[in-house]
Image (cartoon, rainbow, N blue to C red):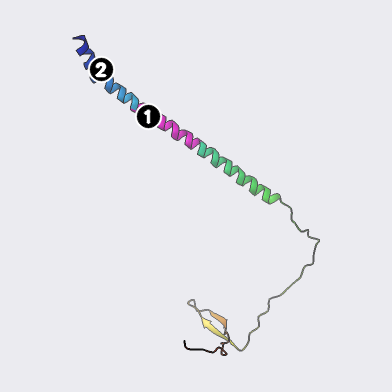
Amino acid sequence: MTTLIFLLIFFFVLLPLGRVAWAVWRQYSMLRKQMRQAEAFGEAFRARQQQQEQAASGHKTRKKKIGRDVGEYVAFEEMRVYTASESTADDARGTTTRVAMESQVEDAEWEEL
């Protein structure tokens, strides 16, 4: 009779409580694992951010490779030269654009195969 009562208590009380405890433990361990992964990701992100900040601050303090006293300053001015082989074209906005006409290649010989 005591064996029957023990088996009933085991199957209807202890086994379900054990299953619930096991499910809670699994969820807790998965949550701990996810938290460790998130912390590792956060540390990697912060390290990467610090590297970028150091690179950016290092880039600003870098000296010029060629000094200002080396070489000459050359002032230049853009000039437009229009030839007779240019035409004008209107685009969709109504502005006129000058387009240079390319010469055609006329010395090519065609041969039938």
Pointer 1: residues within 10 angstroms few (<14), some, or many (20+)? few
Dot 2 and dot 1 residues touching (CB under 8 Å) = no
As drawn, is 2 to the left or to the right of 86? left
The answer to whether 3 is drawn above or below residue 22 in the figure is above
**Picture coordinates of residue 41 (x, y %)?**
51, 39
The answer to whether 50 is drawn above or below residue 107 in the figure is above
Q: Residue at x 66, y 47 (%)?
A: 57
**Picture coordinates of residue 79 (x, y %)?**
68, 79
As drawn, is 46 to the left or to the right of 58? left
Residue sticking out furthest to the front: 113
**Picture coordinates of residue 56 (x, y %)?**
64, 49
| The N terminus lies in quadrant | top left
**Picture coordinates of residue 71 (x, y %)?**
79, 65
Pointer 2: residues within 10 angstroms few (<14), some, or many (20+)? some
Q: Quadrant of residue 7?
A: top left
As drawn, is 68 to the left or to the right of 14? right
Identify the magenta region: 23-39
**Quick one: SS at disc 2?**
helix
Magenta stretch mostly in which secondary structure?
Answer: helix
Q: Which residue is mark 2?
A: 10
Q: Residue at x 24, y 20 (%)?
A: 11
Residue 26: image tag? 1
As drawn, is 38 to the left or to the right of 59? left
Closer to the camera, 23 or 2? 2
Q: CA distance from mark 2 to mark 1?
A: 22 Å
Q: Identity of the amino acid at label 2?
A: Phe
Q: Quadrant of residue 48?
A: top right
The answer to whether 101 is drawn above or below residue 13 in the figure is below
Q: Earlier in the sequence, mark 2 or mark 1?
A: 2
Residue 4 inside the magenta-drawn segment? no
